[in-house]
Image (tube, rainbow, N blue to C red):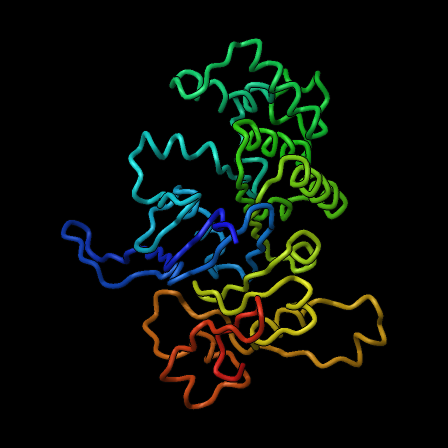
Amino acid sequence: MSEPLLQVKGLKVHFPIEKGIVWKRRVGAVRAVDGVDFQLNKGEALGLVGESGCGKSTTAMAVAQLEAATAGQVILEGQDLRTLSPADLRKARMNFQIVFQDPYSSLNPRMKAGDIIAEPLRIYTRRGILSLTEAQIAEKTASLMDRCGLAANFAGRYPHEFSGGQRQRIGIARALALGPKLILADEPVSALDVSIQSQILNLLKDLQKEFDLTFLFIAHDLAVIEYFCDRIAVMYLGRIVETAPSIELYANPLHPYTKALLSAIPLPDPQKERQRQRLILKGDVPSPSAERQGCPFRERCPLAFDRCAVEVPPLRTIAPGHESACHLS
């Protein structure tokens, strides 16, 4: 079997908590990501799901090297991105790009749409990594705009002249400019209307097939994840608590947190909705800065018992391709 395109091993991102005005001292840390492991094979889409604040976006930023990791490895095509020099990392960035959540703040308001899409090509040409003429850059930009559903005359418009869906199309075209193999999609449709969400998801699916793209897709909407992703990883408090193929996870969730997330999805059939039993979690997500022992989910878990308070459950393989971090799995 070929080597995975992306391997993430023991990834941690801790933000220090400091006190003092002049003489600052570290008094703790926010463990936004606390030991995450996963891998992505070429051409597949892995979804990261979980409540807000569980570390999904921080994981993506650390993989993209836009957030400094405290520990761990991010291995893309056999290269640990954390160990690369700035020059080598710049070259490696051609193989992975990111589509941001907010299509309003992720585009430069002073640049025209065509220039935004062409900017990566111009930067890499100036640095000598690519050798493109201005005519070739213009041709590539026009092709990307057409492929992402943007009219040719949009190239001369500024971001404020576009709708949210059109802005996200510009962001997608920009991410494709350098011909990446991996796309990190950080909640790319959460800021859009539902009708526009489906258009963007279908566009991403078509682009995945056409360009043989691999996706790390982050969302809190489980219906979006089910539609787009081949595999799903469920995160809670900076850790992955369950991974499985999309169909398997929805049919047979093992971790109590996954069951609670799925039970929160409303059913279209009113009768089935009234009859089913929901797993209601108590309390809110604990602070990621608090010191704790045992299972990170035990404070909210309706099935917690004595062992959960003293022993962290490892992520174990329960069935082929299905892993769960629960003592009861």
- On the picture, is 48 further left or further right than 74? right
Q: Quadrant of residue 102?
A: top right
| Extreme-front residue of the structure | 1
The extreme bottom residue here reads 306
Task: Say above or below: 12 vs 301.
Answer: above
Viewer-nearest residue: 206 or 5: 5
Confirm whether residue 123 shows in the render. Answer: no
On the image, the x and y values in percent for residue 150 come to 70, 25
- Residue 136 at what x, y percent from top left? 57, 12
Q: Kindly identify the residue that appears in the image at 42 percent across and 60 percent down.
A: 36
Residue extending furthest left?
A: 23
Position of residue 248 relative to residue 101, above or below, is: below
Q: Nearer the viewer, residue 40 or 36?
A: 40
Query: Residue 145: where, in percent of width, then height?
Result: 66, 24
| Residue 100 image offset from top left, x and y in percent | 54, 41
Q: Residue at x 70, y 17 (%)?
A: 152
The quadrant the C terminus occupies is: bottom right
Left or right of 70: which side holds 101?
right
Q: Decide if residue 227 is in sight here.
A: yes
28 with respect to 167 (left or right): left
Residue at position x 57%, y 50% in the image: 217
Please tell me which residue lies in front, 124 or 149: 124
In this orientation, which residue lies closer to the viewer: 109 or 97?
Answer: 97
Question: How many numbered marks does the figure carry?
Answer: 0
Relative to 112, residue 275 above or below? below
Which residue is at a point 42% across and 54% down the rendered structure image? Answer: 8
- The answer to whether 327 appears left or right of 259 in the picture is left
